[in-house]
Image: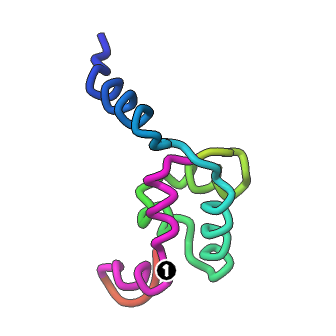
């Protein structure tokens, strides 16, 4: 049995307040494409955004038309400086 009551209550609360959980993916896709064009590895992008490699690929190739608003906010806040500063060793992204 799946217990989803807390999720449903939070969803109803967000909906009543007018907050959207899912938004258009185009701005997120463009930002990820900019970072990928700067030769940031896909694995580093997925680690920084909290998504799987497959999820990042799906956003980049346009097969996802919507993303969670929290994911979009994380992607928009990424920069090359933050990506490089979060690496544990050296300056080479893995």
**Relative to residue 51, is residue 80 depicted above or below?**
below
Q: Residues within 10 Å of mark 1 (few under 14, many from 20)?
A: few
Give the main secondary structure, helix, strand or loop, of the magenta stretch: helix
**Number of numbered markers:** 1
Residue 83 magenta: yes
Horizontal relation, residue 6 to residue 19: left or right: left
**Residue visible at 42% across and 63% down?**
47
Colour scheme of the picture: rainbow
**Relative to residue 10, is residue 94 depicted above or below?**
below
10 and 85: which is toward the camera: 10
Please state the horizontal and vertical placement of residue 6, each as a whole percent of the image. Answer: 26, 26
**Residue visible at 60% across and 61% down?**
28
Please give the range of residues in magenta.
Answer: 67-88
Give the residue pinned by disc 1.
Answer: 79
Please state the horizontal and vertical placement of residue 76, each as a whole percent of the image. Answer: 51, 68
**Residue visible at 65% across and 75% down?**
34
Horizontal relation, residue 71 to residue 64: left or right: left
Horizontal relation, residue 25 to residue 75: left or right: right
Name the outermost residue toward the front: 17
94 and 19: which is toward the camera: 19
């Amino acid at each position: 049995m799946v217990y989803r009551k807390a999720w449903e209550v939070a969803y109803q609360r967000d909906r009543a307040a007018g907050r959207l959980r899912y938004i258009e993916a185009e701005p997120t896709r463009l930002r990820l494409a900019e970072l990928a064009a700067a030769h940031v590895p896909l694995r580093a992008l997925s680690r920084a955004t909290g998504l799987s490699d497959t999820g990042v690929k799906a956003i980049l190739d346009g097969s996802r038309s919507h993303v969670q608003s929290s994911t979009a906010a994380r992607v928009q806040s990424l920069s090359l400086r933050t990506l490089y500063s979060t690496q544990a060793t050296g300056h080479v992204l893995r």
